[in-house]
Image (cartoon, coloured by chain):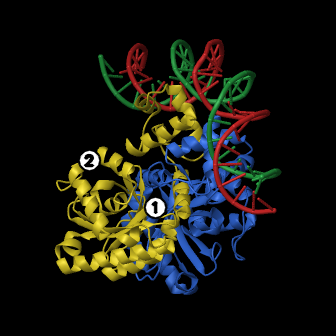
Chain colours: A blue, B yellow, C green, D red
Amino acid sequence: MVQSVHRAVRVLRELATAGPRLGVTELAERIGVAKPTVHALLRTLESEGLVRQDRETGKYLLGPGLLQLGNAYLDTQELRTRSVTWADALASRTGEAVWVAVLADDHVLVVHHAFRPEGAVQILEVGATIPWHTCALGKAIVAFLPEERQAALLGGELPRLTGRSVADPAALAEQLEQVRGIGYALEDQESALGDAGIASPVFDRSGEVVGAIGVVGPVEHVLTDETARRKHAVAVREVARNLSRELGAGRGTAWSEA
Amino acid sequence: MVQSVHRAVRVLRELATAGPRLGVTELAERIGVAKPTVHALLRTLESEGLVRQDRETGKYLLGPGLLQLGNAYLDTQELRTRSVTWADALASRTGEAVWVAVLADDHVLVVHHAFRPEGAVQILEVGATIPWHTCALGKAIVAFLPEERQAALLGGELPRLTGRSVADPAALAEQLEQVRGIGYALEDQESALGDAGIASPVFDRSGEVVGAIGVVGPVEHVLTDETARRKHAVAVREVARNLSRELGAGRGTAWSEA
DNA sequence: TCGCCTGTTCGGTATTGCGGAACTGCGTTC
DNA sequence: GAACGCAGTTCCGCAATACCGAACAGGCGA
């Protein structure tokens, strides 16, 4: 494990989470490293375009190079490239926004976002991260993970984002069991009040979950109306299966049992 | 300059450009570093989620952590956050897609993309990079850069992406002069056949160019029709000025002379 | 004007990362 | 089906390299 690289990434992470603009001194004490060391790391990162320095204040902030790399990641993400057409189809079939996501640590990372067809202002959610247990996408993925991994996630931190977030491991485990039974997961305003979601897992040729696809929208559209919910659930599951097959998942894997 | 960090970034860059999947050996000889060294770097990057390993082939590819960081960069980008509403307004006023971009080295980096209102399939271009001299956004920015910087860019590599790309420094310099005169830049299928653009520079409170905003669309919509072109140019320039003012640029800076 | 806070530079120390050589496991070839 | 070759991986000794204490420079506020 290369120490300086590890520290450099910590610097980037700190800039990403703590604040847009951080000074050398502040960074140094945050990550517990001497000031000149942090300075050297920053200079290196700056020369690579991953960090830039505010000319006026002297403080540092994230650089454009990160966006290029992030975008390059998206291109390598086979799930994303394959899902584009399916996501569009699902969006126009359901009339709702469609998200495609993968699991990164204990968060769900949105890698594709198809806008709701009849949309007013909609902000792009690609790159957004959400705790796995507060969204349908996360539950859909985790339900089909190897058992140890599931246990680890259930045992980890489970923050509450809204009053409706479920933070009890036992209750979540039961939900996951249910997901395995019906092949899709639900979310009822657990990450944001007013928003709900329905998602199904996507598998690859090795038979493992690689991510999930699902609709996201106002509770009234997605969950409240019983018949609409049924319709959406069927559509989501169907699209997820087709997408899985396109990724090489054969029958006999978890998705066909669902 | 921290050597290992520099090398780690080179690894990421290589993965981003050369191919989605690269092996340790291949990476090692590409960047001219011993195999075990590259391996250590990869393991570190992997533990940070910036790189992942394809379990089947053993080869390495970019990881999801990069997308998170890239997204964090976007949030720090004041130009982007401020431009969202202006971009939407411009898109609906012109009926074309609107891009907002900054300059990163000798490439333009798209930081915001407002879709064309009446749109069929449109792919999101946020994160895309284009050589500065083959798009209106790039010319709009470079035209207002300090002279040494301009000279350096004109003296650098000027690849041709289409048959219409302008690769001659003198011709480009003349175009830049023109941009300074009229306050907007044009592109006629210089980065992609069939596509044209009109863009104006955006300034911040220090009076320096921070980026550009402009419309992008089929030549027939954007350039061919003389009256439409005029209308678009006026709209773009106006929005760029308003955006600049919102960022704190005062009168008396370059933009008000344009 | 002074003091205190930044970001920055310097250079010695030993930690740390580096790479040659050897290992392992897979796919391919004969 | 055994032998080869090439991949990713591990080990370990050397010394290059990154780290940090201390001192410097520049700006802001008091």
Q: Quarter-wise, where is residue C13 in the image?
A: top right
Q: On the image, numbered disc 1 is attached to which residue?
A: B208
Q: Is residue B169 above or below residue A40?
A: below
Q: Classify residue B177 as left or right of residue B247.
A: left
Q: Which amino acid does the dot numbered 1 rest on?
A: Glu
Which tag, 2 or 1, sits closer to the chain's start? 2
Residue at 52% from the left image edge and 71% from the top image edge: B248
- Picture quadrant where residue B215 is located: bottom left
SS at badge 1: loop
Q: Amino acid at mark 2?
A: Pro
Residue B43 badge: none
Tell me residue C24's x, y (percent).
55, 24
The answer to whether B6 is drawn above or below residue B140 in the figure is above
Q: Quadrant of the C terminus of chain B?
A: bottom left
Q: Residues within 10 Å of mark 1 (few under 14, many from 20)?
A: some
Q: Where does residue A64 sit, x and y in percent of width and height?
A: 48, 54
Residue at left 33%, top 79%? B235
Q: Which mark is residue B159?
A: 2
Placement of the N terminus of chain B among the 4 image quadrants: top right
Camera-side residue of B203 and A87: B203
Q: Residue at x 60, y 50 (%)?
A: A12
Residue B106 x/y as whole percent:
37, 50
Mark 2 Cα within 10 Å, few/some/many (few <14, many 20+)? few
Above or below, comparing residue B113 to residue B31 in the picture: below
Does residue B166 show up? no
**Relative side of B21 to A230, left or right:** left
